[in-house]
Image (cartoon, rainbow, N blue to C red):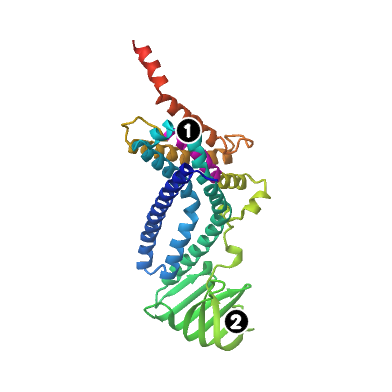
């Protein structure tokens, strides 16, 4: 059964956490929207794809922004309680640091479980969807770069077509001449009109030609075949053999667990470091939240932000060191968390009265 103090701290931390998380998501989603808006204005990105990219980007970064949001929410809540002398009143009632830590830990456990799901499951899925959407954007940009009255090249030269006229929305084509290569065989297609079609299930893009002829054969030989068609579809997507390898960050966690490849281990440890960071920074937040009675809260928030920026840089550095072999494989990237705890201990000791007395004695 939760006590009144536990419920009070839990509620205040939760309110601050939701508010900070919402602000961070709005900032990131807004910056992503502005970044893609320029491409949409240039016609290289449709509105549907742009909104999908913004939504997927918010899901993709949600796991990374949750630990700092929770860290700042604890610091803000405890800092406000100390500023309003609530911490002093609790101490007078016999409620010490361990009791405060227990209340904060009650909020940290569900947040840790949520970040675990975001990092291990949702983030790889969002990365994979993000790659598909960017491929669709690149394809659309390539198609929109086609110019009427000249030859346009697609699929790394396997598809070349000439268009006499293109509609303003770039979906209708007229006076189409196409040269394409399928299985090593050269083909020529002539059609009066066509249109662009995107398969909603697979996302593959096609140019569909109406009422035309196809000539197929080998140049220099008279064994040509001529066929007439009512509709003929040409895929614009890159052929499967030319598709880039799926990035490690988009692979499911189960696949990473089955591999001993160093790049897979780097990504796997990163995914587990995020939920661990929630617990580590929960421990860090308690001593960092304490200050002098007249000390403002904003100085501690700035210190907390500097701590987390240092943590982010150490995470990136640990991945580079692990992959290049600077740090041994058994150490991995886990040394970052103990180092942050050690730095917190040094900061707390530096701000303590004991350290001040030692410095005063040494200056006499």
Residue 207 placement (x, y as % from top left)? 50, 78
Q: Is residue 178 magenta?
A: no
* Residue 315 visible at all: no
Residue 36 placement (x, y as % from top left)? 39, 62
- Residue farthest toward the right in the current orientation of the protein: 258
Q: Earlier in the sequence, mark 1 or mark 2?
A: 1
Magenta stretch: helix, strand or loop mostly: helix
The quadrant where residue 288 appears: top left
Q: Which residue is disc 1 drawn over?
A: 97
Identify which residue, 119 or 32, lies in the foreground.
Answer: 119
Label placed on residue 216: 2
Identify which residue, 339 or 193, lies in the foreground.
Answer: 339
Q: How many marks?
A: 2
Mark 2 and mark 1 in contact (Cβ < 8 Å)? no
Residue 183 placement (x, y as % from top left)? 63, 73
Q: Secondary structure at mark 2?
A: strand
Q: Secondary structure at mark 1?
A: helix
In-image side of 126 versus 39 (left or right): right
Label placed on residue 224: none
Q: Magenta region: which residues? A: 273-288
User: For the C terminus, which image quadrant?
Assistant: top left
Seen in the picture, residue 140 relative to 109 is either above or below; the reply is below
Q: Residue at x 50, y 36 (%)?
A: 99
Count residues near mark 1 (Cα–Cα under 10 Å), then give few for <14, some for 14-19, many for 20+: few
The quadrant where residue 204 appears: bottom right
- How far, Cα to Cα, is label 1 from label 2? 82 Å
Seen in the picture, residue 333 relative to 342 is either above or below; the reply is below
Q: Is residue 275 magenta?
A: yes
Residue 108 placement (x, y as % from top left)? 51, 45
Identify which residue, 131 or 67, lies in the foreground.
Answer: 67
Seen in the picture, residue 96 relative to 37 is either above or below; the reply is above
Count residues near mark 2 (Cα–Cα under 10 Å), then give few for <14, some for 14-19, many for 20+: many
């Amino acid at each position: 059964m939760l006590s009144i103090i536990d419920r009070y701290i839990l509620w205040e931390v939760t309110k601050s956490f939701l508010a900070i998380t919402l602000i961070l998501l709005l900032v990131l989603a807004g910056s992503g929207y502005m970044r893609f808006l320029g491409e949409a204005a240039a016609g290289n990105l449709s509105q549907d794809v742009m909104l999908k990219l913004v939504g997927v980007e918010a899901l993709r970064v949600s796991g990374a922004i949750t630990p700092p949001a929770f860290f700042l929410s604890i610091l803000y809540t405890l800092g406000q309680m100390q500023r309003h002398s609530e911490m002093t009143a609790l101490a007078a009632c016999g409620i010490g640091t361990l009791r405060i830590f227990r209340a904060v830990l009650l909020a940290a456990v569900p947040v840790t479980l949520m970040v675990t799901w975001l990092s291990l499951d949702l983030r790889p899925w969002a990365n994979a969807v993000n790659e598909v959407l960017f491929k669709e954007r690149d394809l659309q940009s390539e198609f929109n770069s086609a110019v009427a009255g000249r030859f346009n090249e697609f699929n790394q030269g396997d598809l070349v077509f000439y268009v006499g006229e293109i509609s303003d929305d770039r979906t209708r084509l007229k006076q189409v001449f196409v040269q394409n290569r399928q299985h090593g065989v050269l083909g020529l297609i002539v059609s009066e009109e066509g249109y662009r079609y995107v398969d909603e299930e697979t996302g593959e893009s096609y140019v569909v030609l109406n009422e035309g002829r196809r000539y197929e054969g080998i140049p220099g030989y008279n064994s040509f075949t001529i066929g007439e068609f009512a509709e003929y579809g040409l895929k614009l997507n890159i052929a499967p053999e030319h598709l880039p390898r799926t990035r490690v960050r988009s692979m499911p966690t189960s696949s990473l667990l089955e591999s001993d490849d160093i790049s897979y281990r780097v990504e796997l440890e990163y995914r587990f470091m995020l939920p661990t960071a929630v617990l580590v920074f929960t421990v860090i937040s308690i001593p960092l939240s304490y200050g002098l009675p007249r000390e403002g809260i904003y100085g501690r928030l700035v210190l907390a932000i500097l701590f987390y920026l240092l943590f982010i840089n150490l995470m990136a550095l640990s991945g580079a060191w692990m992959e290049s072999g600077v740090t041994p494989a058994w150490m991995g990237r886990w040394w970052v968390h103990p180092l942050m705890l050690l730095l917190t201990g040094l900061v707390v000791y530096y701000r303590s009265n004991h350290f001040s007395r030692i410095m005063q004695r040494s200056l006499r």
